[in-house]
Amino acid sequence: MARKLPRPARGKVFLNPSQGVLLIASNLPRTPEGKLYEMWVIPKTGKPVAAGLFQSNTDGSAMHVRPGAVDVQATGAIAVTVEDQAGVDQPTTTPLIVAPVESSPR
């Protein structure tokens, strides 16, 4: 009998320049004790910016909002990593989700 492989984490990201970032994710297993998911706003140039900690639901779904203005033109991607529950200044693990941000020319 073939083993069923776990489905990869998936996420949809919505950016609003004045309202912030909304992430809707699926296939995110619960994190181990002492760990949480951390969302990152990754600029086209420069270091990632922490955008909040969250935990997935028991069914693997998650929704996370980082309220506040976001420079959509300068944002290259939104990513999710697993980090210590206190959060970190910069990602320390490989992202489970990376959602490139395609900004239209002004």
Image (cartoon, grey):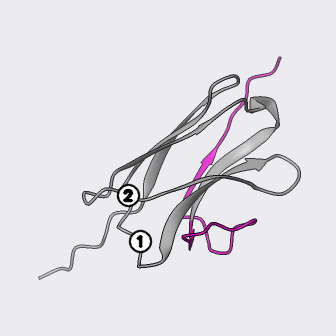
Name the residue that disc number 2 marks. 56
For label 2, the crowd category at 10 Å Cα-Cα, with few meaning under 14, some 14 to 19 and many 20 or more, is some
> Horizontal placement of 66 versus 105: left or right?
left
Is 72 magenta? The answer is no
Q: Is residue 13 left or right of residue 74?
A: left
Closer to the camera, 83 or 13?
A: 83
- Magenta segment, which residues? 82-106
Give amino acid for label 2: Ser
Q: What's the residue at 25%, 57% (across, down)?
A: 59
Of residues 86 and 4, the one drawn nearer to the viewer in this rendering: 86
In the image, 64 versus 43, the foreground residue is: 64
Which numbered disc, 2 or 1, marks the residue that appears first in the sequence?
1
Residue 75 rendering spot, x and y as whole percentages: 76, 40
In which quadrant is the C terminus drawn?
Answer: top right
42, above or below 90, in the image: above
> Any mark on residue 31, and which?
1
Q: Position of residue 13 (x, y in %)?
A: 54, 39
Q: Amino acid at mark 1?
A: Thr
